[in-house]
Image: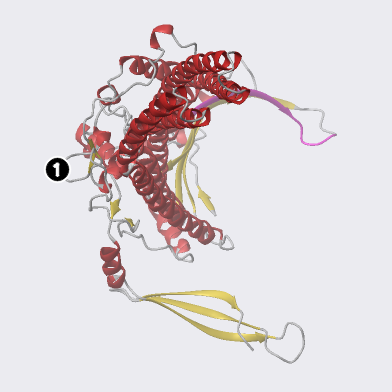
């Protein structure tokens, strides 16, 4: 329902003072507002839920991680690696140069940056909605009373009008602003997640390329060694010292080494392609890594901190949290829709049948009209929208809790990988020493004619495989360092503060409140927007749940239905009463259809 009234003076002699009309209109407006509220009483407005949002991820947030190697620690005294800038965490200058190029040229990261600008512009659009909109128009119309009227008349008009401007008494527009702000912050967190992933991928591709080069060096050295062995075996066969079998075995061993060279060359090409894609352009020659880089970080000890620090450093967790707060703002928008919508509209213009008389004093007219729109009957749309908003917030809360669980699992997986890497490397180096001695003994025994060439080939293959395994484990060790820094949330621009937009415009309802327009109020709002939701333990969540009001539902059937006409009751139609035991008992009755067992 929309109620509107206008005041349009026809002449100066009939005009009254503007002050008197404003007073008169104010009284009428208050009367209309009271009428609107009495009519809105037909709808049951949901009570505002002021309870804090609690996340229960069911993980040991304040406890240390478990199962660590000698180089990794977890304690409250040593903060997480994620607190370090990537420029300080990585020590390899070539790698840092490639990361800088990637942050400048990578298209995925550029898209993430542009998404922030888009979200900022969308917030500005929402903020501008608090400003009145004034439209100008002009036109000419010609009309007749009927199709026989030969005395048609024309009229010229020029108007300047204030479009319907909503007074935000119930916080609907403010909630829309809050929702847009949280969406902006969510987009900012998504950009940080993209940056962290990009830095990690560049570092891993750099390490892969480095160890592919090392594998190529090892394979080429093995080829050179086996070419010498083949030469000796061939000469011994030509001299009649050995049969042909050792030379054939030596030739096969050489071909296997050549295949290893080809595989390493293919791996190098793929690693370079991956690195070039991430960097967003050709890789400068001076930034190609050296083979088998021993260390690319400045860390001697890798500190994982506590799981609670994931809430601060993991941008995907922060993104889920901002989405949760946006869903909460959407609930307030849905709740505000229950209240009357109060708007202002005005118009001032010139109207005349002759263009020459258009700008004379008698052609001036104006109108002013507040209007109140009251939802009276909407067939349950408001209730359904409010229920949808509440369910969406529950979904985003579950997503937020899942993001915390995912972050905890990813850190635990990396730590599990690192737990035995050191011991595996030690065992692999011991194997290398063993097979080096085995090869030397087997080669000497073969040359002395004590054993056959098969023993030499077995020792060669075992030694080569062990050396390849060492390079793989060294690569895994470096990759685990990179991944640990990534899963802890390291790599975002911690030294570059996020520029949080604040409202530049206020609704007319709030403009009189100078306190809300102060710099301090804006700072408080920005801090509150970026603040974190509360994460509780399972025990605390259980205690809170037990202290919450008890909701009881009772069903009173008013009619029974035999759907298939078999003489048995298939369903009952009635009223379900939902009662919540609060300080003030509130009872809500909702007609439902409930299926019962016959």
Q: Position of residue 257 (x, y in %)?
A: 53, 22
Would residue 495 be visible to someone looking at this image?
yes
The N terminus: image quadrant: bottom right
Is residue 576 covered in magenta? Answer: no
Locate the C terminus and report the quarter of the image it occupies.
bottom right
Front one among 377 and 579:
579
Query: Quadrant location of residue 210?
Result: top left
Q: Residue at x 54, y 13 (%)?
A: 231
In the shown orientation, is residue 580 left or right of residue 233? left
In this view, the residue farthest toward the bottom is 567
Q: Position of residue 473 (x, y in %)?
A: 38, 33
Q: Is residue 144 magenta?
A: yes
534 lies left or right of 175: left
Q: Quadrant of residue 480?
A: top left
In magenta, the rendered stretch is 133-147
Furthest toward the right, the residue is 148
Instruction: Find disc 1 in the rendering and name its residue.
Output: 77
Q: Is residue 119 above or below residue 92?
A: below
Q: Position of residue 354 (x, y in %)?
A: 64, 19
- According to the image, what is the colour scheme of the structure? secondary structure
Say above or below: 55 vs 483: below
SS class of the residue under badge 1? loop
Q: Residues within 10 Å of mark 1 (few under 14, many from 20)?
A: few
Extreme left residue here?
A: 77
Instruction: Tell whether 598 sits left or right of 361.
Output: right
Residue 249 x, y percent position in the rendering: 58, 26
Q: Is residue 198 visible?
A: no
Query: Which sits in the foreground, 584 or 539?
Result: 539
State the residue in front, 435 or 325.
435
441 to 367, vertically: above or below = above
Q: Main secondary structure of the magenta part?
A: strand
């Amino acid at each position: 329902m929309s109620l509107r009234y206008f005041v349009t003076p026809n002449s100066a002699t009939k005009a009254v003072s503007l002050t008197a009309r404003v007073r008169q209109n104010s009284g009428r407006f208050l009367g209309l507002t009271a009428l609107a509220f009495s009519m809105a009483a037909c709808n049951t407005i949901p009570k505002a839920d002021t309870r804090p949002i609690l996340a229960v991820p069911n993980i040991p947030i304040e406890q240390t991680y478990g199962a660590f190697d000698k180089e990794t620690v977890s304690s409250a005294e040593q903060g997480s690696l994620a607190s370090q800038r990537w420029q300080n965490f990585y020590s390899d200058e070539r790698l840092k140069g490639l990361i800088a190029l990637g942050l400048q040229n990578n298209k995925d990261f550029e898209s993430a940056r542009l998404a922030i600008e888009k979200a900022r512009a969308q917030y500005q659009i929402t903020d501008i909605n608090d400003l009145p909109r004034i439209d100008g128009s002009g036109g000419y119309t010609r009309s007749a009373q009927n199709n026989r009227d030969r005395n048609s008349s024309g009229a010229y008009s020029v108007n300047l009008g204030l479009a319907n401007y909503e007074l935000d008494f119930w916080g609907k527009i403010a909630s829309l602003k809050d929702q847009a702000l949280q969406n902006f912050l969510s987009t900012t967190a998504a950009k940080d997640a993209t940056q962290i992933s990009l830095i990690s991928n560049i570092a891993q591709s750099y390490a892969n390329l480095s160890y592919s080069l090392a594998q190529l060096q090892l394979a080429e050295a093995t080829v050179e060694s086996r070419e010498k062995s083949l030469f000796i075996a061939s000469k011994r066969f030509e001299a009649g010292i050995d049969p042909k079998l050792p030379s054939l075995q030596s030739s096969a061993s050489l071909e296997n080494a050549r295949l290893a060279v080809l595989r390493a060359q293919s791996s190098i090409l793929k690693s370079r392609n991956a690195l070039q894609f991430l960097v967003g352009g050709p890789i400068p020659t001076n930034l190609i890594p050296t083979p088998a880089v021993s260390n690319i970080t400045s860390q001697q000890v890798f500190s994982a901190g506590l799981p609670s620090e994931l809430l601060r450093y993991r941008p995907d967790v922060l993104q889920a949290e901002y989405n949760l707060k946006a869903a909460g703002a959407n609930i307030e928008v849905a709740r505000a829709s229950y209240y009357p919508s109060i708007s202002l509209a005005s118009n001032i213009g010139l109207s005349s049948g002759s263009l020459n008389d258009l700008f004379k004093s008698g052609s001036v007219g104006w109108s002013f009209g507040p209007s109140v729109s009251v939802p009276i009957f909407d067939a349950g749309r408001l209730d359904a929208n409010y229920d949808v908003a509440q369910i969406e917030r529950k979904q985003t809360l579950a997503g937020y809790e899942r993001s915390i669980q995912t972050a905890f699992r990813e850190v635990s997986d990396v730590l599990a990988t690192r737990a035995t890497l050191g011991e595996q490397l030690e065992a692999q180096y011991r194997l290398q020493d063993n097979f080096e001695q085995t090869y030397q003994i087997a080669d000497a025994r073969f040359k002395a004619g004590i054993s056959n060439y098969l023993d030499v080939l077995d020792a060669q293959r075992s030694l080569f495989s062990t050396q390849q395994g060492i390079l793989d484990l060294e690569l895994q060790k470096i990759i685990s360092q990179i991944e640990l820094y990534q899963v802890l949330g390291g790599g975002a621009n911690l030294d570059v503060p996020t520029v949080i937009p604040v409202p530049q415009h206020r609704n007319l309802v709030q403009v009189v409140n100078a306190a809300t327009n102060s710099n301090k109020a804006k700072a408080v709002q920005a801090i509150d927007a970026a603040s974190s939701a509360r994460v509780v333990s399972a025990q605390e969540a259980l205690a809170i749940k037990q202290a919450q009001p008890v909701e009881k539902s009772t069903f009173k059937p008013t009619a029974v239905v035999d759907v298939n006409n078999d003489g048995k009751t298939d369903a009952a139609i009635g009223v379900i009463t939902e009662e919540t035991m609060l300080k003030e008992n509130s009872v809500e009755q909702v007609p439902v259809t409930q299926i019962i067992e016959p």
